[in-house]
Amino acid sequence: MSLSRPSRIQPFFSNEPFKIPLKDQPKTIQRGGWLYKPPKVCPLCTQPVWKNDPDYWFAKDTLWCDCPSCGTHFGIAGKWGTE
């Protein structure tokens, strides 16, 4: 996974809610912050992208990932703060 900004960003849409309740967040995440979960499948080829593992959850910044099947590079929106 690369943290550099890609020249072309693929759109990502999902019916799955990304907002994770505070009680379900990893213990290292501070209270009051939102944690966003990466998609489980690639938005284009629908192949699995992430395992259901806390190591694949990100917060604070927008991160980028590549689909291991088709190589699609797409963004994961992460929002940090209280709302």
Image (cartoon, helix red, strand yellow):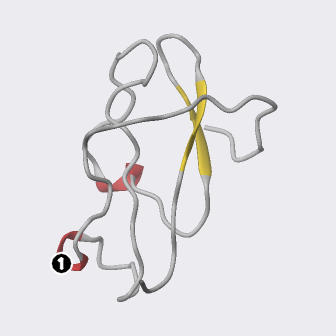
**Residue 34 percent location from the top left of the image:** 40, 73
At 39% across and 78% down in the image, what residue appears?
29
Quarter in which the C terminus is drawn = bottom left
**Residue 82 percent location from the top left of the image:** 44, 86
Quarter in which the N terminus is drawn = top right
| Quarter of the figure with residue 19 | bottom left
70 and 77: which is toward the camera: 77
Instruction: Examine the rendered structure and indicate whether residue 80 appears above or below residue 48.
Output: below
| Quarter of the figure with residue 27 | bottom left
**Residue 68 percent location from the top left of the image:** 49, 19
In the displayed structure image, the side of residue 43 where residue 17 appears, left or right? left
Count of numbered circles in the view: 1
At 28% across and 48% down in the image, what residue appears?
53
Density class for disc 1 (Cα within 10 Å; few <14, some 14-19, many ≥20) is few
Instruction: Examine the rendered structure and indicate whether residue 77 appears above or below residue 33.
Output: above
Instruction: Examine the rendered structure and indicate whether residue 48 appears above or below residue 40.
Output: above
In the displayed structure image, the side of residue 26 where residue 81 appears, left or right? right
In the displayed structure image, the side of residue 55 where residue 66 appears, left or right? right
Q: Which residue is mark 1?
A: 23
At 41% across and 45% down in the image, what residue appears?
38
In the displayed structure image, the side of residue 21 where residue 55 appears, left or right? right
| Quarter of the figure with residue 2 | top right
> Which amino acid lies under the numbered mark 1 shown in the image of this protein?
Lys
Disc 1 on helix, strand or loop?
A: helix
At 35% across and 17% down in the image, what residue appears?
46
**Residue 22 percent location from the top left of the image:** 24, 78
Instruction: Examine the rendered structure and indicate whether residue 51 appears above or below residue 37.
Output: above
Q: Residue furthest left?
A: 23
60 and 12: which is toward the camera: 12
